[in-house]
Image (cartoon, grey):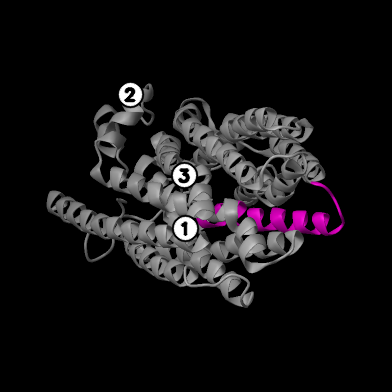
Amino acid sequence: MSIAATPTTMPPIKRATTGITRWHIATVALLGLGYTGYYFCRSDYSVALPLILAEQVGRGVPASIAQIRLGSIASLGVLAYAVGKFPSGGLADLFGGKRNFLGGMAGSILFTVLFMLGGGFPLFTLAWIGNRFVQSLGWAGLVKVTSRWFSFSSYGTVMAILSLSYLFGDAASRELMSILLAHSMGWRGLFLVGAGLLAILFVANLIFLRESPEGLGLASAEENPLNVYAEETNISHESEPKGMLAILRPLLSSASFWLVCILSLCTTLLRETFNLWTPTYFTQVVGLSNSAAASSSALFPLAGGVAVLLAGILSDKLGPLGRGRILYIGLLLTAAALGCLAQVKAHGPVFIPVALVALVAFLLIGPYSYLAGAMSLDFGGKQGCATASGMIDGVGYLAGVLSGNSMAHIAVSFGWQTMWVVLAAVAALSSAVAAVSVWEQRKRAHALQLATA
């Protein structure tokens, strides 16, 4: 799957030694805070869902129908996000990451305001689809800029820090919205605040973010010498592929890359289901108020953020071969935790379901963060990292579409416990795929060792 060495299985690779300057730190801060801002215009839907549902019921729409319609809107949004992921990576690789990053921000601000002005399902659907589609530009742009600024020996740690933007950023946005809800702000106010905060971060990145260090007279970052483009680069002596076909061909011919895409399918379904339905589960089953549910749902990205940071630092110490093992163990334990969550009874002790949701996050999100982060940089280097990230994320979010409508149908028709059982099975399948990917890594490592000898 990934492609760097450990001392016992692969030829030694010289570690990159590019120094860290204040510009490197500023770049991480701008990218991290900027992507955090995306979540002020993404988590608002999940947090506001109980209020929007109540509003529609108050207008005469049956509760079950309204819940399924709102779940369908979420699913269509995830589908738009997934579709947008595929071209977003290629655009960043061909034209630069900063354009992607800023374009996603600007579009999200506009569509968030449009959603706020809506009053019914047609406009809600249009605005949410548009919002999720333009937001697909952001992560690929972030990955591309990162490949220009940071060397391969620090991919795990740097991407872990940046991944905190969609975890702690998600948690921070939910906590802020919880405070606003506690002060009687309506769901439209939440959307307006989110759009305003993202606008501030857009201006900061527009002014200060730089595409690469070379324009500032700083050293170029070293890419992983075993990325899928390395052999072609050595033959042609060109550091950049010409056109999308040259970017796609090495990726699509890699078996390890396809295993990562399958893992992304399964783990994105798990993550998106929790992101969307946790507040509703806490209100309907656990019995929390809307503000308490929003606050408790923030534990999912918060616990996941801690896991991401630990997993990223550990992967830089173990090398990319260790990422597969961490994936396997984490997903296996996730399946067990979901099985426990399926045993929780309605309106029982609050601590148990809240703690189990946080545990699932801790076990799942650390491994999940590798897929479209450090592993994409390992596969693609500077040339195709954004394309690799976009494809991995895009394939994953195709399954994430099921987190809305399909999970709503399961919860309404068969109950929340059945939904958790289904997700436990998905986690167990993911663990099996991760085991195969570890075997694939060892096989490729052995082939590379023989070739070097």
- Foreground pick, 300 / 123: 123
Q: Are marks 1 and 3 in contact (CB under 8 Å)?
A: no
**Crowdedness near tag 3: few (<14), some (14–19) or many (≥20) residues, C-alpha within 10 Å:** many
Question: Foreground mark, 1 or 3?
Answer: 1
Q: Of callouts 1 and 3, which one flags the residue occurring earlier in the amino acid sequence?
A: 3
Tell me the CA gap for discs 1 and 2. 41 Å
- Foreground pick, 35 / 69: 69
Residue at label 1?
Answer: 419
Type of amino acid at the residue the image marks with label 2:
Leu
Considering only vertical position in the picture, is 228 above or below 167? above
**Crowdedness near tag 1: few (<14), some (14–19) or many (≥20) residues, C-alpha within 10 Å:** many
The image shows residue 284 at horizontal and vertical percentages of 64, 61
Residue sitting at x 42%, y 58%: 423
The image shows residue 295 at horizontal and vertical percentages of 71, 63
Considering only vertical position in the picture, is 8 above or below 96? below
Q: Of callouts 1 and 2, which one flags the residue occurring earlier in the amino acid sequence?
A: 2
The image shows residue 83 at horizontal and vertical percentages of 47, 31
Question: Foreground mark, 3 or 2?
Answer: 3
Q: Of callouts 3 and 2, which one flags the residue occurring earlier in the amino acid sequence?
A: 2
Residue sitting at x 40%, y 35%: 384
Q: Secondary structure at mark 3?
A: helix
Type of amino acid at the residue the image marks with label 3:
Leu
Q: Is residue 214 visible?
A: no
The part of the image, by quadrant, that contains residue 376 is top left
Question: Foreground mark, 1 or 2?
Answer: 1
**Crowdedness near tag 2: few (<14), some (14–19) or many (≥20) residues, C-alpha within 10 Å:** few
